[in-house]
Image (cartoon, helix red, strand yellow):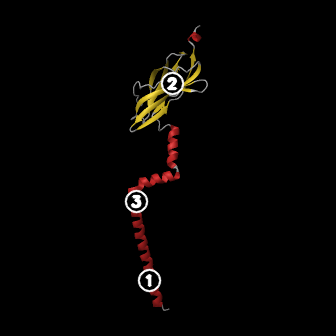
């Protein structure tokens, strides 16, 4: 091999390297352009699929449920109670402090059902009641007169409300926190 042939091969190798670099550069450019185009058109679908595949969506949903971010209402802790004494067979007054969440701001309360649980753990439903009024996003104190079911006997009981909301095209059910009270005979309160 002569020096001229060696130099020709070196020049050819240089040209091949430059040509390879040029092809690789254009390939990377067009590959990047295709990636940007695909992400612009289908990015949300790809992101949702990846989150579902990894289980991130389910984790976010569980976290939202635990923290209450998906609830329609929120309660002021410790502010709700039943006005006592409560006598057997007589109506009672529930005082409850509620506010609508940002999620529930567009929802409308259709009705609520009082649920009573007695000393034996038996839950009984009262009569479904229409809302007194719709509440806003600030806490409001409501006084609701409720007639307990006839089967509710003497002793300790819990009361909570099952709320039925219309949120757009779907119905959402929520429960308030339970409130405890005692059911007495009318003569038990005599001095």
How far is mark 1 from mark 2, CA to CA? 88 Å
Disc on res. 12:
1
Q: Position of residue 119 (x, y in %)?
A: 60, 23
Q: Which mark is residue 38?
A: 3
As rendered, which of 162 and 106 lies closer to the eye? 162
Residue 83 appears in the picture as rendered: yes
Q: Answer with the quarter of the image where residue 155 lies.
A: top right
- Mark 2, residues whose alpha carbon is within 10 Å: few (<14), some, or many (≥20)? many
Say which label, 1 or 2, has the lower sequence index: 1
Mark 3 or mark 1: whose residue is earlier in sequence: 1
In the picture shown, does residue 67 fall above or below 29?
A: above
Q: Which mark is residue 103?
A: none
Q: Quadrant of the C terminus?
A: top right
On the image, which quarter does residue 99 sit in? top left
Residue at left offset 47%, top offset 34%: 173
Where residue 24 sits in the image (x, y, percent)?
A: 43, 71
Q: Which residue is mark 2?
A: 80
């Amino acid at each position: 091999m002569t020096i001229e042939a060696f130099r020709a091969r070196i020049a050819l190798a240089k040209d091949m390297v430059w040509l390879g670099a040029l092809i690789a550069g254009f390939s990377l450019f067009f590959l990047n352009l295709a990636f940007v185009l695909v992400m612009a058109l289908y990015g949300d679908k790809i992101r949702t699929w990846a989150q579902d595949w990894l289980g991130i969506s389910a984790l976010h949903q569980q976290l939202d449920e635990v923290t209450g971010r998906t609830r329609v209402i929120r309660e002021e802790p410790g502010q709700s109670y039943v006005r006592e004494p409560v006598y057997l067979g007589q109506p009672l007054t529930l005082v409850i402090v509620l506010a609508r969440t940002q999620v529930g701001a567009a929802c409308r309360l259709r009705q609520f059902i009082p649920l009573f649980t007695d000393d034996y753990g038996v839950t009984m439903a009262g009569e479904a009641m229409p809302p007194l009024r719709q509440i806003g996003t600030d806490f409001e104190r409501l006084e609701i007169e409720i007639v307990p079911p006839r089967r509710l006997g003497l002793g300790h009981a819990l009361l909570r409300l099952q709320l039925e909301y219309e949120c757009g095209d779907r119905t959402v059910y929520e429960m308030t926190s339970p409130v405890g009270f005692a059911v007495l005979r009318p003569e038990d309160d005599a001095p």
